[in-house]
Image: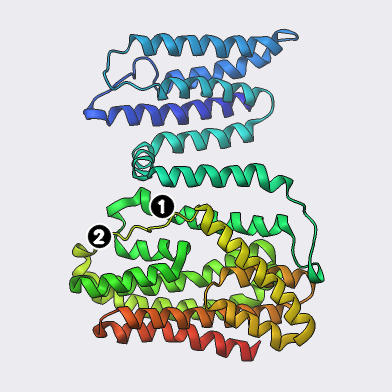
Amino acid sequence: MQAITALSIGLLVGLEREYGQRKVNGQSKHIEAAGIRTFAMVALLGNLMTWLPEPLHLWMPALAITFVALMAVFSYQRTNDSDKGFTSEAALVVTCILGTLTGYGMGLPASMIAITMVALLHFKKWLHHFSHSLSKVDIRQALLFLVLTVIILPVLPNQAFGPYDSLNPYRIWLMVVLISGLGFAAYAAIKILGQRSGLILTGLLGGLASSTATTLAMSRLSQKSPELQSSATLATLLACTTMFPRVLLLTLIFSPELTWALTPSITVIVLFAMAVSACLWHQSRQHQKGSQQLYHPKKNPLSLRIALAFGLFYALVVLFSHIALAHFGQQGLLAVAGFSGLSDVDAITLSLAELNQQHASSHLAAQGILLACAANSMVKLGIALSFSPKTTYRWLISGLLPMIVLPLASIYFL
């Protein structure tokens, strides 16, 4: 069974390499050196070396990997292509290592690594496009953020401080990492997809990064480009709708019980918003050709300044939520939720999810989150009506007003 796993890994990687090489100028390149059969045999070689009796099975796999590496280097040196790379040769060595891992009973990790490697090989163009689209500022901010995350996060004290033991430095920065990472995933997707994504997909991805910023950008675009009004308005509605599934995702990570309390209300809201969006999409299809322009976010969500600002805001929301619940009860907590929702939904969502694990009931936390969503939707409706042309008001009000009314109505039933 281990040999079959190794063979499968070799065939998978080799199939991708041979297919990818044949796509270059319509002809094979390097296939004679490393094709599907070569990768399969190299993976089997790594696996078979672990079958040898002791002590050979301890050092023979290392010798086999070294042999494959030398053959890869020799093959690379024989290649006369001016644009040659070392990707296939490196993949060959990794395939041998993965075959060895299967022989040591680590078939599942080896398979997962193989699938990841195949994805990296297959999405070469997208990855290159993404790397070329990043600015020096993007890279510097990402590296600085990763340093603060990988090095600083583990050493932060994981215990409560401050009034009512409400402030936990480790959890505060963990929330910053989560929100910034989610935003950067959307930011990266927009960078990778480029012009082919169009405004509709931009609305969905932009909603994950920042639905408020996307609403403002799409509203301005619909004002400046009349031919894109329908598509830009649709992107606005989709960005605002994305906020609700994002809220469910955040609560699911930190408080599944709260997710169940929110699911019925948010499902109704999303279905209603998608119905309005479907009607608008039907109208915007005639402008689809012209809607392939793309809004690129101006700010990298991994910016240290943005991360620190969110961390400070989140800490204040957590602190005021504990104080409000202790001194003013349910009404005080809902007031904090409403005010914080005017600027950001993520902070109060994470705060109430954490508070639900400690003091507040699921229904009270769900009411606070829905109130914050309603307040945030009210702000986005105001932004959209302020910057969009009057011809889009009908669709904006039809799509965004329910995102205000339905959450408020759900609070009553909760």
Viewer-proximal residue, 242 or 65? 242
Place of residue 198 in the rendered image (x, y in percent of width and height, measured from the top left): 29, 60
**Residue where numbered disc 2 is placed:** 293
Residue 237 quadrant: bottom left
Residue 351 quadrant: bottom right
Callout 2 crowding tier (Cα within 10 Å): few <14, some 14–19, many ≥20? some
Q: Quadrant of the C terminus?
A: bottom right
Amino acid type of the residue tagged 2 in the rendering: Gln
Which residue is found at the position 55% from the left and 47% from the top? 145
Which residue is found at the position 36% from the left and 76% from the top? 277
Q: First in sequence: mark 2 or mark 1?
A: 1
Residue 291 numbered tag: none
For residue 198, above or below residue 279? above
Residue 16 relative to residue 178: left or right: left
**Residue where numbered disc 1 is placed:** 189
Which residue is found at the position 65% from the left and 22% from the top? 103
Viewer-proximal residue, 89 or 235? 235
Is residue 276 in view from this perspective?
yes
For residue 124, above or below residue 247? above
SS at mark 1? helix
Residue 59 relative to residue 266: left or right: right
Is residue 251 in view from this perspective?
no
Viewer-proximal residue, 127 or 155? 155
Place of residue 171 in the rendered image (x, y in percent of width and height, measured from the top left): 70, 58
Q: Quadrant of the N terminus?
A: top right
Viewer-proximal residue, 242 or 380? 380
Amino acid type of the residue tagged 1 in the rendering: Ala
